[in-house]
Image (cartoon, rainbow, N blue to C red):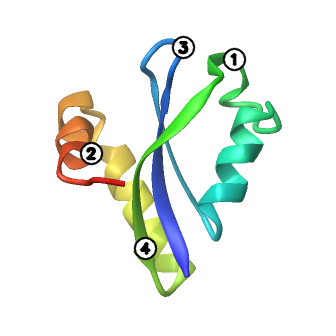
Amino acid sequence: MFYVYILKSVKNGAYYIGSCENTDIRLDQHNKGIVPSTKRYLPWELVYKENFDILKEARRRESQIKSWKSRKAIEKLIKQFKI
């Protein structure tokens, strides 16, 4: 199973969108500062995830969400999802 996930920075409210195979491990990597692009906005919390059978589909969805470039659209998506 593969996932598209959205993280929210507790520090400043910024969002990060990514894809992976295990969201628990990936969130841990983000919060340990292993991921250079998210390191300065620690800590992060998982606010959204969507599952896919194929990595290619997850990456396609990740690109789609990133293409919105709208905080409102991302927050609307998150609001519909409850972890």
Q: Is residue 71 above or below residue 66?
A: above
Alpha-carbon span between mark 3 and mark 1:
9 Å
For marks 2 and 1, the one nearer the N-term is: 1
For marks 4 and 3, the one nearer the N-term is: 3
Alpha-carbon span between mark 1 and mark 4:
27 Å
Residue 13: assigned label: none
Secondary structure of the residue carrying tag 1 is: helix
- Residue type at the position of mark 2: Ile
Q: Are marks 1 and 4 in contact (CB under 8 Å)?
A: no
Q: Which residue is tagged 3?
A: 11
Secondary structure of the residue carrying tag 4 is: strand
Alpha-carbon span between mark 4 and mark 3:
27 Å
Q: Which residue is tagged 4?
A: 51
For marks 4 and 2, the one nearer the N-term is: 4
Secondary structure of the residue carrying tag 2 is: helix
Front residue of 54/6: it is 6
Mark 3 vs mark 1: give the one in front: 3
For marks 2 and 3, the one nearer the N-term is: 3
For marks 1 and 4, the one nearer the N-term is: 1
Residue lying at the far top in this picture: please name it.
Answer: 12
- Residue type at the position of mark 1: Arg
Residue 78: assigned label: 2
Residue 40: assigned label: 1
- Residue 5 position within the rendered picture, expressed as x and y whole percent measured from the top left: 47, 54
- Residue type at the position of mark 4: Asn
Could you tell me which residue is drawn at 17 percent across and 41 percent down? 76
- Residue 67 position within the rendered picture, expressed as x and y whole percent measured from the top left: 33, 46
Could you tell me which residue is drawn at 80 percent across and 34 percent down? 32
For marks 3 and 1, the one nearer the N-term is: 3
Alpha-carbon span between mark 2 and mark 3:
18 Å
- Residue 9 position within the rendered picture, expressed as x and y whole percent measured from the top left: 51, 24
